[in-house]
Amino acid sequence: MNVVEEKIDNLNAVLRVKISKEDYAEKVEKTLNDYRKQAAIPGFRPGKTPISLIKKKYGKAILAEELNKAVNQSLYDFIRNNNLQVLGNPLPKQDEEVKGDFENPTDFEFAYEIGMSPDFSLNLDKAAFDYLKIDISTEMLDKEVENLARRYGKLVSAETVGERDMVLGKFTELDGDKPKEGGISNTSTISMEFIADSAAKKSLMGAKAGDEFVLDPKDVSKGSTDMAAMLAIKKEEAEELNSLFNFTITEIKQMIPAEINQELFDKLFGEGNVKSEEEMRSKIADDLNRMFSGDSDRVFNNALSKHLIEETKIDLPESFLKRWIAATSKEEITPEKVEQDFEGYRNGLKWQLIQNKLIKENDVKVEPQDAINYVKSMMVNQYAQYGIPAPADAELDKYAKNALSNQEEANRIYDNLYQGKIFTLLKGMVKLNDKVLSYEKFIEEAYGKQ
């Protein structure tokens, strides 16, 4: 077998694979004999079918299969041995047929097109980015302390409905001013603090057990999903519902927040770890900073990757890539659809090439222990979210290795780790201007323009 490369330009080439009879004849003969041993052809005992009949029936298919194997192996070996940086996989040359005679096989020649990965340079010397941070304000800390106190507080019965109370009662669907025959009826709860409709909220304020109201459930719920749960119906039914309901209050529950004392500190942070409200607020501020730093990184990473994709000049073998996308699509795809989606594909490929360049030039590596530690860290965080102590390190280690035995999950984890290392590297290569914003302004600037 012989492979010759014909360069068309810096991004495209043709590989010609020449295969002589000696390269495939023995394998074809062996496969034919194997078929003969197994063939069940009427009129012949198993294994006694004349080889000429086997050749006539299966010869061309077997020859084509062996040639395909030989060509694929030759292409793979040539690309690897010559360190060709290709994009996608080789494709049969469009305007050229296979040279060779399947009726009287001797020598064959196959032509394949390949797309080459381009050379390009990254220039980040003068790049500058705003690094958005969320201001942990006194107001935000006050709200977090209040939320935690309410979370660990207790519900008590109340005489009248207040702004943040839970109102238990019975919903009955109406037909005019009377209960609807066969209509919806359900006992549920209205949370006063989540009512957005001011008129509905005002009408319930100060009410007592036994009081009745005519209301639209849309006005006392947070969307169709919440309303469906409130009325014990399907979401689709809630979206179509236009009825008014009678609501009879049966009970009023008021949340009494927990006291800000040592008992609460111990519940939140473990016994003796926090000893004052000041320490509690400092701990909450640290937790919020850690949480929001992930948002800051995501916004920065999106801005940086978008900048690199748009500003880095990378020439691609676009005609080849469009053919390759069509050829490898799991579903039939039209040329129009390829054109329509190509910009997104091109940007994704450019970003992958940029990442590969950074990994190679900066010797970025992710070791197996990095992946294990990553999984263990995720587990510890998950346990912490539910206030549950994490298992012993040996148990975490066992779980992490088991998770990484799933190849798809392992690929996802390694991709995340490489992404993280790449962005850490890039963060040190550009100028960052810290920009501290309120939470509302952060959301507006980070996501409002997208």
Image (cartoon, grey):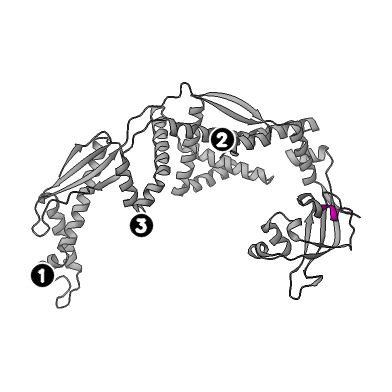
Q: Tag 1 or tag 3, which sits nearer the N-term?
A: 1
* Main secondary structure type of the part rendered in magenta: helix
* Residue found at x 37% / y 27%: 121
Residue 346 included in the magenta stretch of the image: no
- Circle 3: element type: loop
Asked if residue 385 lies left or right of residue 117, the reply is right
The nearer-to-camera label among 1 and 2 is: 2
Disc nearest the viewer among 3 and 2: 3
Q: Is residue 214 left or right of residue 52?
A: right
Q: Which mark is residue 332?
A: 3
Q: Badge 1, how many Cα within 10 Å: few under 14, some, many 20+?
A: few
Is residue 18 left or right of 203 when viewed as pictured?
A: left
- Pointer 1: what residue? 50
Q: Amino acid at mark 3?
A: Glu
Asked if one can make out residue 276 in the rendered structure from this viewpoint, the answer is no
- Amino acid type, callout 1: Pro
Residue at the disc numbered 2: 299
User: On screen, 250 above or below 427?
Assistant: below
Residues at marks 3 and 1, CA–CA distance in whole angstroms: 42 Å
Residue that lies at the very extreme toward the bottom in this rendered image: 43
Magenta part of the chain: 200-207
Amino acid residing under circle 2: Val
Disc 3 vs disc 1: which is toward the camera? 3
Considering the image in quadrants, where does the N terminus appear?
top left
Asked whether, in this view, residue 8 is left or right of residue 210, the answer is left
The number of numbered badges drawn on the structure is 3
Within 10 angstroms of label 2, few (less than 14), some, or many (20 or more) residues?
some
Q: Are marks 3 and 2 in contact (CB under 8 Å)?
A: no
Q: Quadrant of residue 359?
A: top left
